Image (cartoon, grey):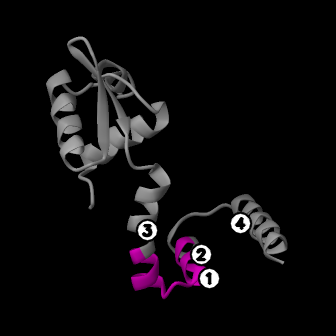
Amino acid sequence: MKLTKAEEQVMQILWKIEKGFIKDILEHFGYPKPAYTTIATIVKILGKKGFVNFRPYGNAYQYFPLISRNRYARAHINPVFKHYFKNSLTEVVSFYIDNNKVKTKEIDETIKVLNHLKKQKK
């Protein structure tokens, strides 16, 4: 299930802080901060969608992710990778480099990472 931009923004925060109350989530937003009730509504929707759960503490609730960031990313990146790039890492890298201003240093670092991964696969 794909998240809306606002839902994904809240999930990014929860993945970062691992658990938190609405006020904790709000602290990670820039200015202007969204309303407390807006975040509470988004978290409630995320709960209904099965992305978060909570622990009650008196009248407050501490929220935590039920789905990891990696699991969510895999579910949404793999179909794009398969459909647009024929499951080819070479096509992804070429596309990214051709369509973005990638510095030579970053390309060199990527090559190092790929060489390291290649050695691990042997």
Sooner in the amino-acid sequence: mark 3 or mark 1: 3
Looking at the rendered image, the quarter that the N terminus falls into is bottom left
Q: Which residue is mark 1?
A: 90
Name the residue tied to disc 4: 107
Q: What is the three-letter code of the residue carrying label 2?
A: Val
Residue 74 drawn in magenta: no
x%, y% of residue 33?
A: 27, 25
**Secondary-structure class at tag 1:** helix
Residue designated by label 2: 93
Quarter of the rendering containing residue 106:
bottom right
Q: Nearer the viewer, mark 3 or mark 4?
A: 3
- x and y, in percent, of residue 82 in the image: 44, 82
Residue type at mark 4 is: Ile
Q: Give yes or no for contact between labels 2 and 4 (Cβ–Cβ under 8 Å).
A: no
Q: Camera-side residue: 31 or 50?
A: 50
Residue denoted by label 3: 77
Q: Is residue 47 above or below residue 32?
A: below
Quadrant in which residue 94 is drawn: bottom right
Placement of the C terminus among the 4 image quadrants: bottom right
Q: Earlier in the sequence, mark 3 or mark 2?
A: 3
Name the residue: 15% across, 34% down.
Answer: 41
Q: Pick out the residue farthest to the top.
A: 58
Label 1 with label 2: CB-CB less than 8 Å: yes
* Magenta stretch, overall SS: helix
Look at the image and give the residue range highlighted in magenta.
Answer: 79-96
x, y (%) of residue 80?
40, 75
Q: Nearer the viewer, mark 3 or mark 2?
A: 3
**What amino acid does circle 3 point to?**
Ile
Name the one closer to the observer, 20 or 12. Answer: 20
Q: Residue 100 has which mark?
A: none
